[in-house]
Image (tube, rainbow, N blue to C red):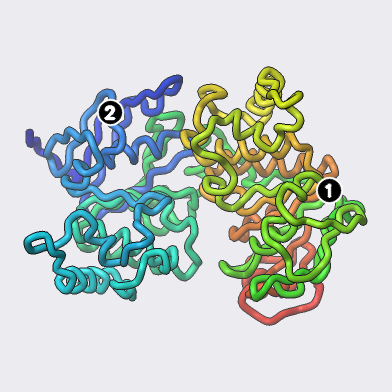
Amino acid sequence: MTIESKYLLKLRGIDKRFPGVHALKSVDFELSGGECVALLGENGAGKSTLIKIIGGAHQTDSGSITVKGVVQRWIKPTDSLDAGVAIIYQEFNLVPGLSAAENVFLGIEPENYGWVRRGEENAKVQEVFKRIGADINPDALCDSLTVAEKQLVEIAKALVRDARILVMDEPSAVLTKKEVEQLYLLIDDLKQKGIGIVYVSHRLEEVERVADRAIVMRDGARVGELSKEDLDRAKIIEMMVGRKLENEFPQETRSPGRVRLRATKLNRGQKVKNISFDVRMGEILALTGLVGAGRTETVRLLFGADQKDSGVVELDGQVLELGKPSDAIEVGICLLTEDRKDQGLVLGQSVRDNFGLPNLKKFSNKGWIDASSEAHSFNSYIKKLQIKVSGHEQLASQLSGGNQQKVVLAKWLERNAEILIFDEPTRGIDVGAKFEIYQWMNQLAKAGKGIIMISSELPEILGMSDRILVMKEGELMGELTNGPNVTQETLMSLAIGEKIEHAA
């Protein structure tokens, strides 16, 4: 059925329910050719569900979808793809062991009598790569590509299938600043070619740069729309959270006490080179630098996830032997990993099982788990952290990013850890959930815990930390006491510049 429509994509009255959750409530959405529309909202607002409906991964309970005026009935992702819609999810859908060209043409290989015409395939891939400014060898295995290159392969997959609608879900989450700028230029070029783009991001400064309009969702419903001229950070935040947020970072005055954790001359290959620092009671110590600076590699040594070549780690004056993560956990050092989905949670297990996993000793008696005690404790954190779950048995994979992070935080809070390491704690999390995480970090510091925070977001570094360590290529470039004279420019110059001694 064809109807008149000025829109490339039009959704009307989209409704979707899951057990215990009304995920989408009569949502309308529209996209024109050559337009970039930002889809905004807190974690759990319904964005991911809407994207999966647009991509054919979920079916609607009610409502209609039209593409170029044609009413669609999608029951699987290939139906959406055949209609000209391509989704680039946060977790790329690539086969690591295949080449870039093979991934681009996967399922639509040019062939003769069952033999793939590799020459034709490579020529077409090179043509598409040239269109999007991708300097990638078609024969290179995807496993060897950078994150930015993998993203370009995903975009090439969409273009070679003649997709006219491109949905980008948090496309810049793991890109460097330079790569993000290249992404902006690519989006501008795709718009010029008449492609419609749905852009999902928690980074509001990006939205202001790329979007022609923004549609805001909250609690499964569309709550408003902002034009290009009205894409103001404060307005977006207020619409997303349903209230005015006076400060992005909770204001807190801290007076750090004695040293709790001390690292002396840590080394691990070329990733960590002679790193020394300490963390004090009631302090938030920030660790920043460009991608590849060695931040994560450094804290993995503190957690026993990697083994140091040399150096000493002490907690409250006692030298630690950290052969494995359980050694660190036992003495009260816990790590909220950068990649919560791969390393922080067992996605196929329930949220209660994930909460209990590092706390089995506490909740077990003679080899049997006291399910009642475990459930009681988990309930208390659901209330404290305001975790949105349909029940204890809900799979961790079904939670939004913000709620997944809260489950990870809950399991470490139950351990009553003394040193908490937050590696990119708010990546992929909306402003409302970020504020809650910040409040908990402040409360933990107030309780005398020592906190290490790794972040690539310089405003977050400046808004939350007491001291800042800046790294580059495995080395410590400088240590700064946070204050009015420390700016983003100060941190960036250290991250790319010359090494300095401790500075106030």
Indicate the amino acid at tag 2.
Thr
Q: Give residue 93's mark.
A: none
Asked where in the image residue 186 lies, by quadrant, the reply is bottom left
Q: Which residue is mark 1?
A: 282
> What residue appears at the point 44 percent right and 67 percent down from the top-left corner?
146
* Residue closest to the eye, 178 or 108: 108
- Label 1 element class: loop
- Label 2 element class: loop
Whether 62 is drawn above or below 489: the answer is above
Measure how far apart labels 1 and 2 are at the Cα level: 49 Å
Q: Quadrant of the N terminus?
A: top left
Whether 102 is drawn above or below 419: the answer is below
- Whichever of callouts 1 and 2 sits on the residue coming sooner in the sequence is 2
Q: Position of residue 205 (x, y in %)?
A: 48, 56
Q: Give residue 60's mark.
A: 2
> What residue appears at the point 64 percent right and 80 percent down from the top-left corner?
497
Asked if residue 359 can be seen in this view, the reply is: yes
Q: Position of residue 187 (x, y in %)?
A: 32, 61
Q: Quadrant of the C terminus?
A: bottom right
